[in-house]
Image: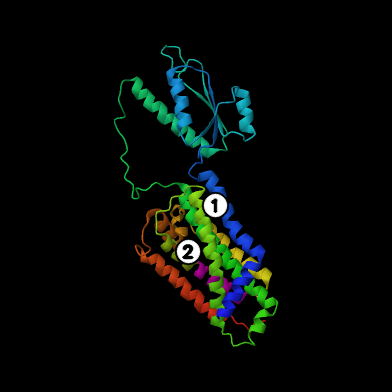
Amino acid sequence: MLKLLLSDIKMTFRNRQYAFWAIMFPLLFTFMFGFFFGDKATTGGNVILINRSDTPIAKNLEQVLKDNSMFKINTDVTDENAAKDQIQKNKAAAALIIPPDFGAMKSDAPKQVKVIDDPGNATTNTILFGFLNQYFTNLTFQSAGIKGPIYSVDEEKTNPKELNYFDFVLAGILGLALMNSSIISIAVGMSKYREDKILKRITTTPMKTWWFITGEILSRLVMNFLQVTIILLIGRYLFHAHIYGNIFVIYALALLGAVLFQLLGFVIASFVKTTDAAQGAATAITIPMMFLGGVFFPIDTLPKWLFSIVQYLPIAPLLRMIRSTVLEGASPFVNPVNLAIIFGWIVVCLAIATWRFRLSEE
């Protein structure tokens, strides 16, 4: 089995296309979400600011907008029609026009600012109008001589640590990388072995089926380890993701998930006969889990009947454990149900794989 393990590791890294895409596929998601939602990203988009008033209130509003990390403020555009053109060409998300004498202490001074926005850009519109409404509410209180609102919200966080959406997604990308590379590589690889009669040749050796399965899984864990390392390094040091958990626990959970997904790949390979069929079956399994397993958004936002089903998908409990470890520094034993589901899937997949997968199958 040791010889098989070493040969599999060599073949894995000699297959340059597999190694390239196994690393690049999750990195594409890491860079994409990192640039949009990372530590230095702006969630409100690019907003054009045309300030035609020189009053202290107008200047203060402009400064507050510039200091706020939610928006990237552009003051180079000074014409309203040019601002509309920029929005129509998707070069800006919205434009804020402050009229002359806004904020001046005289009765005929304008009391409204103008926002030009794209109705299709709901995210920017919500953030910008929410920001302006809060700012003008506080300004109204001050103008009326009221020091602050009478009623307010007292927030108590279950996790006092600093977090953002990219931190949530980074843990999901770890699970996505492990799932895609493990399931697809095993299912397609074993089908390719069958088509090329490699499995049939192995039957002429003393190799047992469970030896073969174990060797294949261990060899691919090397690639999984490399995937996790690169994703964590780029997420942490390029996009400043917050990682609070024990790094060894994170690796242990990730590799446990990799073992599960590879066994699932063997299950697929035991039922399909061709490479094309394996590719289709693996895609049909991984795509729904990618969107319903909690990779990009919390699954508790799904309809109740759907949540009651998808919470038991293989990737869902894995991501719950990885996220609680990465974001909160919690132990995976805090909620042992997640571990029970993972090991339950491992036992079921291992039983099916050893029962159905045969080296002698044509």
Q: Which residue is found at the position 50% from the left and 45% from the top? A: 38
Q: Position of residue 320 (x, y in %)?
A: 43, 59
SS at circle 2: helix
Q: Residues within 10 Å of mark 2 (few under 14, many from 20)?
A: many
Compared to residue 48, the image places residue 218 above or below, namely: below
Q: Which residue is found at the position 49% from the left and 59% from the top? A: 293
Residue identified by numbered label 1 = 30
Residue identified by numbered label 2 = 254
Q: Which residue is found at the position 55% from the left and 45% from the top? A: 35
Which residue occupies the foreground of this view, 321 or 217? Answer: 217
Which residue occupies the foreground of this view, 338 or 300? Answer: 338
SS at circle 1: helix
292 horizontally vs 202: left or right: left
Q: Position of residue 64 (x, y in %)?
A: 44, 28
Q: Magenta segment: does it hold 269?
A: yes
Q: Position of residue 307 (x, y in %)?
A: 45, 58
The amino acid type of the residue labelled 2 equals Ala
Compared to residue 153, the image places residue 271 above or below, namely: below
Quarter containing the C terminus: bottom right
Q: Which residue is found at the position 58% from the left and 79% from the top? A: 3
Compared to residue 141, the image places residue 301 above or below, namely: below
73 horizontally vs 276: left or right: left
Q: Position of residue 122 (x, y in %)?
A: 53, 38
Numbered range of the magenta stretch? 258-272
